[in-house]
């Protein structure tokens, strides 16, 4: 699934975004700024994202995408010791 979704530019842009800012407005006209920070620390080490996660059965997990020259790699790590 990761291989196929990474063919789409919009998905690539979303999963490699480190920090996202936006303004939201409520139904009475008030607004506030929101900030989302990606938990994928591998983005700061040349990887192009995909996802991090944690479940009781699988433990901490990560799916990473990496490109170099004419090659691309997808790495899947399940039941990591930590997400750090």
Image: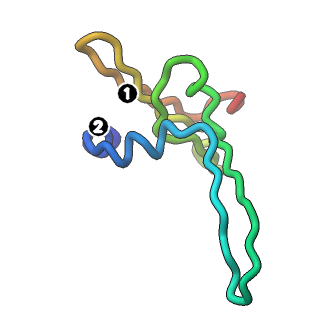
- Residue 11 position, x and y percent, is 38, 47
Q: Can residue 1 be seen in this view?
A: no
Q: Where is residue 17 in the image (x, y as percent from the top left)?
A: 53, 40
Q: How crowded is mark 2: few (under 14 residues within 10 Å), some or many (20 or more)?
A: few
Query: Is 7 displayed left or right of 13 in the figure?
Result: left
Residue where numbered disc 2 is placed:
3
20 versus 31 height, above or below: above
Tell me the crowding category of disc 1: few under 14, some 14 to 19, or many 20 or more residues within 10 angstroms, Cα based. Answer: some
Q: Residue at point 74% right, 73% down?
A: 31
| Number of numbered markers | 2
* Residue at the extreme bottom: 28
Q: Quadrant of the C terminus?
A: top right
* Residue 67 visible within the image: yes
Residue 18 percent across, percent down from the top left: 60, 37
- The answer to which of 59 and 46 lies nearer the viewer is 46
Q: Residue visible at 35% across and 48% down? A: 10
The residue sitting at 73% across, 60% down in the picture is 33
Above or below, 36 against 82 in this view is below
Whole-angstrom CA distance, mark 2 to mark 1, is 7 Å
Query: In the structure shown, which secondary structural element does the residue marked by tag 2 occupy?
Result: helix
Where residue 13 sits, quadrant-wise, is: top left
Q: Mark 1 highlights which residue?
A: 74
Colouring of the image: rainbow
| Up/down of 1 relative to 66, above or below | below
Quadrant the N terminus occupies: top left
Asked if labels 1 and 2 touch by Cβ distance under 8 angstroms, the answer is yes
């Amino acid at each position: 699934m990761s291989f196929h979704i990474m063919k789409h530019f919009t998905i690539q842009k979303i999963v490699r975004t480190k920090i996202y800012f936006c303004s939201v407005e409520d139904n009475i006209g008030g607004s506030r700024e929101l900030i989302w920070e990606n938990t994928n620390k591998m983005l700061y080490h040349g990887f192009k994202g995909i996802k991090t996660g944690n479940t009781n059965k699988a433990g901490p997990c990560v799916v990473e995408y990496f490109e170099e020259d004419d090659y691309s790699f997808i790495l899947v790590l399940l039941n990591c010791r930590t997400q750090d």
